[in-house]
Amino acid sequence: MKIALIWQGINGRYGQWKDGLWAAMKVIEKSHEVRYFEPYDANCYIWRPDWILYWEAPCTAQGKDKDKYEWVCRLPFKKALLFAGGEIKPMWVKDFNHLFIESQVDMDTCERWDIPHSRAFGINDEIMKPQSQPKVWDGMHQCTCASWKRTWLMTEALKEKSMVCGRFQPHDPACFDRAREHGAMVLPEISAEAVAVCLNASHCVVQTSGEWGGGQRATLEAMACGIPVIAMNDSPKNCEFVRESGYGIICSPNVESIKKAVEEVKSKTWDKSIASEYMKKWTSKKYAEDILKILCS
């Protein structure tokens, strides 16, 4: 089978991009022919794949990059959308044969709208795993700099005992600017291997993302490293993983609640085998199997 993965910026990031999707595609490459394309690349037409996988948020259909979204939708091949966050509406996904979904709340939405869908998500479990590291930070959060991540809640609560890292966005600098004001360690986008070291050097990940804030991959990466997660109670997707695994704490999205939750995390002994057992359903191999189950059916 010929499978094309389309993602804006993939050529610039491929080789440095090592998340769960990257690892899943490496598994798929062992049994199928896979090529990677940017939107608007005419070579995708020429190659004529059996399936197109497109990583994007459905709401992009109405956003600043809607032209690239429409270009993919017009491709005359079977298409599956790899859900990348945001809201789902039928008119935004009508041109896709299938949606691969990360969270139960989005599964429920697809069922309500009768949209073909299944669960497929995971992390790079070859990189994200427990390490013996001294604890440097009380809490950290790895994320793209974006206001809906609300990392200032963590950095205000933990000050110099907190760390954020990720891709800086000049048009939305609030997360990183406010983190520096609070005295937190701020790192740019770093390799997946470096993220794993930082996770293991933290007492917990403070997942401050809100309802549409995403962050599920960061939550699962922390658990894969044996690091508990503090999720905000208005973030159903991250709360789902914390409740299901039992490996973390759910609190209110305010500074005092976060302080108390971090102290609770630090006062407990966390059984890493619980996280390890839970993460068996989110490996890159399972991610690849869940994708191929649909593409080969």
Image (cartoon, helix red, strand yellow):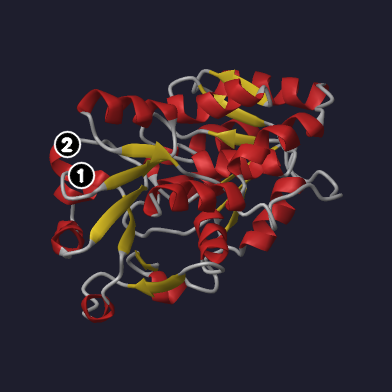
Q: Which is nearer the eye, 53 or 14?
A: 53
Q: Is residue 189 visible?
A: no
Numbered disc 2: secondary structure: helix
Query: Residue at horizontal 31%, vertical 65%?
Result: 50
Q: Amino acid at mark 2?
A: Pro
Q: Amino acid at mark 1?
A: Val
The residue that label 2 is drawn on is 90
Q: Can you tell which quarter of the image residue 223 is in? A: top right
* Residue 269 in the figure: left or right of residue 139: right
Check whether the beta carbons of the residues at disc 2 and disc 1 lie within 8 A of each other.
yes
Numbered disc 1: secondary structure: helix
Q: Can you tell which quarter of the image residue 101 is in? A: top left
Count of numbered marks = 2
Kindly give the residue lying farthest to the front in the view shown: 297
The residue that label 1 is drawn on is 93
- The quarter of the image holding the N terminus is bottom left
* Residue 249 in the figure: left or right of residue 29: right
